[in-house]
Amino acid sequence: MNLVGIDDLSNVTVLLEVHAGSRFTTLEEVAALDTGAAISAGKPAGEGLDVFVADIPIATAEAVVIEDKLAIRITDLLPAISARENVPPRASAGTATEPESDGPERLPPAVSGLCISMHVTLGRTALRLREVFKLDSGTIVDMGRPVTEPAELVINGKVAGKGKIVVIDGNYGLKLLAKASSS
């Protein structure tokens, strides 16, 4: 029986993502999003950014700009990985409302309160596991994109739009500049 050694695994490439916050939202809130709208990511603006490898939180970081490119500086590594603490809140029963004749189409009350995950992604880059193992406080990671490139609004695992990072009521948020095309 051949077992894969740690040396073999160190060459595996994984995806590192940086989030400016994540939370659960309702389908009703998502349906109401339009270009120019701002949505809170639910993370206080003074806190560090969340760093994930393969969807697992590993560190916090701060954004830095190096020669017009976005990078992050690791500020703290998280302790041993545990189960995710984010559990969606139970949706409250909605009350039926008649759609306005000239307004946007409304979701049926039975699904408008359903909770789905959303997060704001500042960037992502591929790293080999050996590079992930070397991450430490103060490490700089190039995100491989211009600092002027918009951040992404990711809803239920899919990019729903792009926008500019803003602060809403003291929390990171995103002002939507463009919605993703439907496919």
Image (cartoon, grey):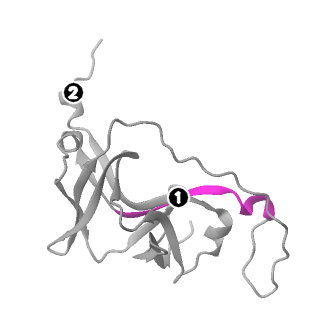
Where does the magenta region start and end?
109-122
The residue lying at 49 percent from left, 75 percent from top is 169
* First reached walking from the N terminus: tag 2 or tag 1: 2
Residue picked out by circle 2: 6
Asked whether residue 127 is in view, the answer is yes
The quadrant of the image that shows the C terminus is bottom right
Q: Amino acid at mark 2?
A: Ile
Residue at screen point 68% across, 67% down:
28
Check disc 2 and report its element: helix, strand or loop: helix
Q: Which residue is mark 1?
A: 23
Q: Amino acid at mark 1?
A: Arg
Is 13 above or below relative to 126?
A: above
Q: Residue furthest top?
A: 1
Quick check: 4 above or below 33? above
- Find out whether residue 183 is within the magenta segment: no
Does the stretch in magenta take in 119? yes
Q: Residue furthest left?
A: 67
Left or right position of 94 against 79: right
Task: Using the numbered discs, state the Cα–Cα distance from disc 2 to disc 1 in whole angstroms.
Answer: 35 Å
Residue sitting at 82 percent across and 85 percent down?
Answer: 101
Badge 1 density bin: few <14, some 14–19, many ≥20, Cα 10 Å? some
Counting from the top left corner in percent of width and height, residue 4 is at 26, 23
User: Which sits in the foreground, 35 or 65?
Assistant: 65
The residue shown at (32%, 49%) is 15
Give the foreground label among 2 and 1.
1
Residue 111 image offset from top left, x and y in percent = 74, 59
